Image (cartoon, helix red, strand yellow):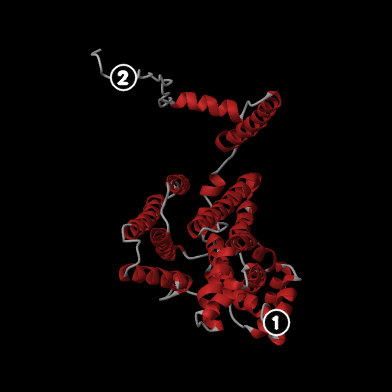
Amino acid sequence: MAAGMPAQPQQRRIVLPPHRVRAGRPWSVKAREWIRRNLFPSRNGTILTAVAVGIVGALLAGVIWFVFIDANWRVITDNRWLLFAGQFPREDAWRLWVGMAFVFGLIGLTYGTWSSLGRKDHLFVALAGAFVVFLMAHGGAALWSSLWFLGAVGVMYGAYYATVWMPRETSPQRTLQVRVVGALLAAALPIALIILLAFGGGELRRLDGFVLNLVLAPVGIAGGLVIAIPLAIGRASSMKAISWTCTTYIEVVRGAPLLGWLFVALFILDDVMPGPLIVRAMAVMAVFTGAYMAESIRGALQALPRGQFEAAHSVGLTRLQALRLIILPQALRISIPPIVGQAIAIWKDTTLVTVILPLRELKGNADSAIAQFEFTPYRLEVYVFVALVFWAVAFMMSRISQRLERTLGVGER
C-alpha cells in the first residue's frame, strides 16, 4: 500500500444460507401426503378409516351386485312411456320433446347470462345424458327418442355458448340480454303449456306421469314466490289490518298439512273453481308454498339493518321505491337458501297428488307398472328408479342454488 493513502476497510463477506427452492412435486407424492394427513392422522383415525372403508365397500359391492347382476331393469325400459308421460297420446310425443328443448334452451340461456358451466356441470350433463340414452335404447322408437333428446341437449349448449360469449360488462346489449332472458323465464311455464296443449293438443287432464311432476312443481314454486312476497311485506307492515290479515293467512295455511289442502281441492274448491282438477291442485300447491316462503322472506326483511331504510329516505326515495330497489332485492338474496329448500320440498311433495287426487304422476304410474303381472316381483327396481329420478332433480336444484349463492355473495359481508 502506498504511503500516505488511507487504509481501506476490510469488507466482511456475509454468507447467506442457500435459498430453498421448492420444486414441483409429482402428484403421487401429493396424493400420499393427503392420504396420510386426512385418512391416517393417528391410531384412532386409522381405525375409523378402516371401519368406514369396510362399511362403504360392503355397501358399494351390494349396490354393484344389485344394479348389474341381480336387478331386472326391463320393468323400466318396457314401461318408460308409462312412467314418463302416462296416458299422454303417443302421436303427440313431439310436443313433449319440443317442450323439453325449450326448457333446456332456457337453462342454457340462464347459465350463459348469469353464470358459467364448470367441469362438474359438464360431467353431470354427460352422465345424466348417458343414463337417459341408455334408458331409451330399447324398443321400436329408440332411435328417434335418442335423437330428440340429444337435439334438446344440443339446443341447451347452443343457447349457452350463444350468450356466454356476449359482453358481461354493463352496456345496452347486456341490459337487453338480461331483460330478454328474464322475460323468457317469467313466461316459461305458459309457453311450455302452450307447446303441450295448444293447437289441438288437448286438455290439462291429459298431463300424466313424470310430465305432471314437472308441471306441478314449477307452478307451486313460482306461484308460491309470487304470493309470498306481498305476504311477507304485509306481515311486516305497521298497518294492523294488513299485518293481521297476512298473519292469519300464513298461520292457517301452515297449520294444516298439504294432504289436508289437497282434500280441500278435491271436495270444496269444485264449486269455487270448476274445471280440471289439476288446476285446483296447482292453486293449492302455490298457496301452500307461498305461506312457507313468506316466513323466510319476512325473516330476511327483519335481518336487514334499519339504516337501509334511512339511507334510502335520505337520497329522496319514497317508501315504495326503497322497498323495490333496495330492501326487497337484499331480502330475496338473503333468503335464497330457505326458499330453495322449500322448493325442493314441494318438488318431492308432488307425489302426494296420487294419494288424494285421481291424478297419476311418476310415483302413481310406478305403482301401475308394478301392478302388471309379469313385473310384480320387480317392485324394488321401480322404486329405486323413481327415487333416483327425484334425487337427480333435487340435486340439480341444490347445485343451482349453490351457484346462485356464490354469484350473489350470499353469506359474505
Q: Amino acid at mark 2?
A: Gln
Left or right of 357, for residue 192:
left
For the question of whether residue 277 can be seen, the reply is: no
Return the residue nearer the eye: 71 or 11: 11
Displayed quadrant of residue 347: bottom right
SS of the residue under disc 2: loop
Q: Are marks 1 and 2 in contact (CB under 8 Å)?
A: no
Mark 1 or mark 2, earlier in chain: 2
Q: Position of residue 395 (x, y in %)?
A: 56, 52
Quick check: 89 above or below 24? below
Q: Measure the alpha-carbon separation of dots 1 and 2.
A: 92 Å
Q: Position of residue 328 (x, y in %)?
A: 56, 73
Return the residue nearer the eye: 390 or 305: 305
Instruction: Give the residue at mark 1.
Output: 243
Q: At x 64% / y 77%, what residue is drawn?
A: 231
Q: Amino acid at mark 1?
A: Ser
Q: Position of residue 277 (x, y in %)?
A: 61, 75
Quick check: 170 above or below 411? below
Left or right of 12, for residue 413:
right
Q: Which quadrant: the N terminus?
A: top left
Return the residue nearer the eye: 38 or 12: 12
SS of the residue under disc 1: helix
Displayed quadrant of residue 222: bottom right
Rate crowding at label 1 as few (under 14), some (14 to 19) or many (20 or more) other CA atoms within 10 Å. Answer: some
Q: Give the number of the mark in front: 1 or 2.
A: 2
Q: At x 59% / y 28%, what residue is drawn?
A: 37
Residue furthest right as drawn: 255
Instruction: Give the residue at mark 2.
Output: 8
